[in-house]
Image (cartoon, rainbow, N blue to C red):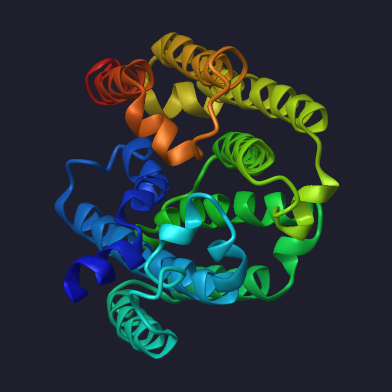
Amino acid sequence: MVFRNTILLLRPRQWIKNAFVLAPLVFSKELFVVHPLIAALEALVAFCLTASCVYIINDISDIEADRAHPEKRNRPLAAGLISRTQALIVVAVLFGIALLLALETNLRFQLVLVVYFMMNLAYSAKLKEIVLVDVFIIAAGFMLRVLGGAFAIDVQVSGWIVLCTLFVSLFLGFAKRRGELLLVQQVRPGTERKVLTSYSVNFIDQMLTIAAAGTVISYALYTVAPRTIEIFGTEKMIYTTVFVIYGMFRYLYLIHMRNSTENPTNAVLSDLSIVAVTILWGITCIAVIYFGGKG
């Protein structure tokens, strides 16, 4: 039981977010090269462990608010299944392992990992209560994942990919806030966290529209950028844009037509259409990048 609660404390379902670490590996045409692959996987594991540390610290910080939340009250700390002391021991062990893995990479990756951790400490302490800044911190976490993945294998990351990551992470951040706001209003009005009182569903919907448009446009521009065409030796990357557009439209459909209040991770993992289009996008990208060029 203790082991199961500890695993739940780590929130392994959330590790899917760290797939952003692998983006530079795929788009730099290094996916099938042994040394970069190993370095990227080490970076991925380091980010997963560090992210779990962040989740645990955030749960400790939010323990009282989580106990009043209709879903978060079932988390191990809020439910009293694990003590604060035990949780802090887990944090120390996980972060120690993450640092050991980081030592296998280079200084730039190590700095990114430390910045990610410190930024999230600031988020848990104060920044999560500042409207808009809270979502931008979430977005910065995704951007650091991409940069960390690039630094780990020592490649240059496209500015368009960084911009696309910013927009898609803002989209996911606002979607998360929208789900939290609706869920609390439906189940226990008046118990929402302080920052949620500064948001409204209408405002968040406007932000989602802007972020979705920014994601599609920046990704499309990346696929037709001269540097992209030169590196991949093909103009076919533009065809992968249709999957990105469908994925964004599908998620907006879930939000507006099915009134989904799930957090983005659960929504992505539970909706078969989004899972399918993500797999198709990944396969198509690999096919175009590695087998669609001129040689």
Q: Is residue 46 above or below residue 95?
A: above
In the image, is residue 197 above or below residue 83?
above
Of residue 163 and residue 141, the one placed in the foreground of this image is 141
- Please tell me which residue lies in front, 290 or 146: 146
User: Residue drawn 55% across and 33% down?
Assistant: 261
Residue that sits furthest to the front in the current view: 188
Q: Quadrant of the N terminus?
A: bottom left
Give the quadrant of residue 69.
bottom right
Determine the residue positioned at 65% across, 40% down. 170
Give the quarter of the image for residue 102.
bottom left
Would you say 279 lies left or right of 271 here?
Answer: left
Residue 280 shows in this picture: yes
**Above/below status of 156 relative to 83:** above
Residue 60: image location, x then y, percent: 52, 76
Position in image of residue 249 (x %, y %)? 55, 13
The answer to whether residue 30 is above or below residue 2 is above
Count of numbered circles in the view: 0
Q: State which quadrant residue 133 falls in.
A: bottom right
Determine if residue 108 is in view.
no
Q: Quadrant of the C terminus?
A: top left
Q: Position of residue 9 (x, y in %)?
A: 35, 67
Q: Looking at this view, is 20 or 288 the one in front?
A: 20
Is 177 displayed left or right of 20 in the figure? right
Residue 253 in picture, x, y percent from top left: 55, 14
Q: Residue at x 61, y 41 (%)?
A: 187
